[in-house]
Image: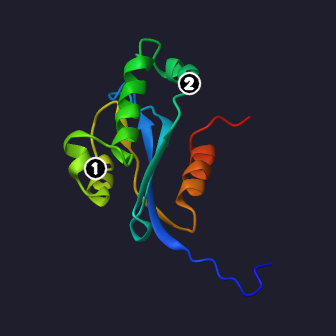
Amino acid sequence: MNEGRETTRHVFEYAVLRVVPRVERGEAINAGVLLYCRPLSYLGSRVHLDVDRLRALDPAADPEAIGRALGAAAQTCSAGATGPAGEEEIGRRFRWLTAPRSTVIQPGPVHTGLTSDPDADAERLLRVLVLPVS
């Protein structure tokens, strides 16, 4: 029990990154999460590409290219982001990454939650929404 201690929780927003190898078919696999917490000035991501699931949807998909695209999204979230993205405020970066698009990497809808530890919640969301069930 938290006797005498209150944990401050802050609103956060998150979106799942989906891989849609054949846009015309609309089939997707979850491959990452983006998490933004304005009060804590936090923008983070976690990515994991399940190559076997990707090949099940499209045997001709290029996992290396898709992995690079997921890595670019993760880099945009990092504190060390370079180029034009690195010059933008983290809220603008999150909005740019979650804007609808019809490419192989697509963001899902933005959802909200409460957190006292955004890193831990990013890991939890990756485990629950992306990683294969063992």
**Residues under numbered marks 2 and 1 in contact, where contact means CB atoms less than 8 Å apart:** no
**Mark 2 residue element:** helix
Residue 44 x/y as whole percent: 44, 50
Say which of 59 and 105 sits in front: 105
- Image quadrant for the C terminus? top right
| Location of mark 1 (residue) | 99
| Location of mark 2 (residue) | 53
User: Is residue 21 visible to the viewer in this orientation of the structure?
Assistant: no
**Numbered label tally:** 2
Position of residue 115 in the picture relative to residue 111 (left or right): right
Residue 67 x/y as whole percent: 43, 26
Residue drawn at x 44%, y 19% as measured from the top left: 63
**Mark 1 residue element:** loop
The outermost residue toward the top is: 60
Q: Which amino acid does label 1 sit on?
A: Ala
Q: Residues within 10 Å of mark 2 (few under 14, many from 20)?
A: some
Q: In this view, does 106 lie above or below 4?
A: above
Residue drawn at x 33%, y 50% as measured from the top left: 98
Q: How crowded is mark 1: few (under 14 residues within 10 Å), some or many (20 or more)?
A: few
